[in-house]
Amino acid sequence: MVLLEVNHKDLREIIRKSYETQNSLYIWGTTGIGKSWSTEAEGRKIAENEGREFVSWNRVSKKEKHEIEKNPENYFVFIDIRLSQMDPSDLKGLPALNGSDTVEWKIPYWLHICSLPGMKGFLFFDEINLAPPSIQASAYQLILDRALGEVTISDGIAVLAAGNRIEDRANVYDLPKPLQNRFCHITLKIPNYEEWTTWALENKIDDRIIAFLNAYPTKLMGKINTKSNDMAFPTPRSWSKGCSNYIKGEKDLKIIERYASASVGMGTALEFASFLKFQKQIDWKAILKDPKKAGEIKELDMKYSLLALASEWYGEHHKPEDLDKIFKIANSIQPEFAILLMRFCINKHKVSFMKHAPTLKSWTEIWDKYGKYFEV
């Protein structure tokens, strides 16, 4: 499959443009790299820019849905439709037996919401190519003509879709040519560790995972081995939604290894646990007493472990004198590690960091060296 490949930043710009132009967009890409997340995240940003309340339709109560129906001009809806779980009638609806000579249709509630004047949002067909071609065909008119039967969706609703590729071995069906031609197509690249690190810091992913993946970038995305019996394997999604959520605040290495195994597979979990064991070899009390000792650490694994350890410590100790110690440690280590440590700490306690940093002499040297590399 030869398609334009884009990173996550470019994808979000294309999603916004698709919303503005009403072009239906299909996002291809391997599993667990953020196709759905990027779509929802851009929807949230558009909603904020337009002064509307973002609503994930599939997650709100019946009462909330009725409120949205009454005041569509106040909301931006994100409606996630899985065609693989539907019959054709689930899209078109059912005939209303009203005793007349004509047939009227009771349409799905979500389709009714999309048709309301003033409604804005995304109609998102996730994993669309998991559905058999007969079910996919039922969405033809909705995707191209923005209508289904006698119902036309609002001008403020963008139609988007996503799915895995045949080569991802995801048991997907080929899209019929008529359906292919109803979309604009792009492929989302697997993020590199630098792109993922920026995202992970902004989204409060556990610092120990970020440090580990900076030390071992190839562990961010494992190869999908169809012959393996492993049910869990590393992807950006399994690291963030799975492992990070499980281990947040957890100190026991055995428990961390257990949760990591459930999320990213046993082999990767063992490597992650071994990486965390390096923290026990670091004399943290001696470094706090004499920050220059941080610069004496030579092993790469130990350097990244130090960053995770320092970040965890700053998460619990963030008075001015504590931040001063962090700055002195940063001034004692190599630039790339100092920059990452600052990014960790800014994301831990941004308000406190910005309040105290300018009052400390140790900050001046940090800012002069590395200020252009991070935002405060």
Image: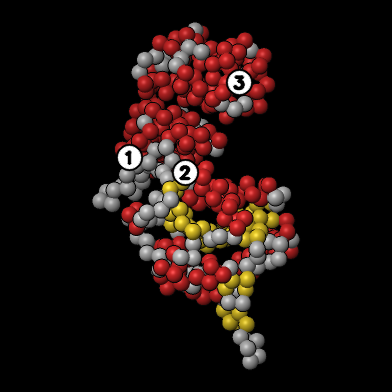
Residue at point 39%, 38% (across, down): 220
- Label 3 amino acid? His
Is residue 113 visible to the viewer in this orientation of the structure? Answer: no
Report which residue position mark 3 lands on.
Answer: 318
- Label 2 amino acid? Asn
Residue 7's tag is 2
Residue at point 43%, 35% (across, down): 193
Tell me: 331 left or right of 299: right
Judge whether 157 appears above or below 31 on screen.
below
Q: Dot 2, how many residues are within 10 Å of its Cα: few (below 14), some (14-19), or many (20+)?
A: some
Mark 1 vs 2, N-terminal side: 2
Q: Which element carries disc 3, helix, strand or loop?
A: loop
Residue at point 61%, 79% (across, down): 105
| Residue 273 place in picture, x, y as percent | 37, 30
Report which residue position mark 1 lands on.
Answer: 266
Tell me: 84 left or right of 103: left
In what quadrant of the picture does the N terminus appear? bottom left
Mark 3 vs 1, N-terminal side: 1
Nearer the camera: disc 1 or disc 2: 2
Residue 241's tag is none
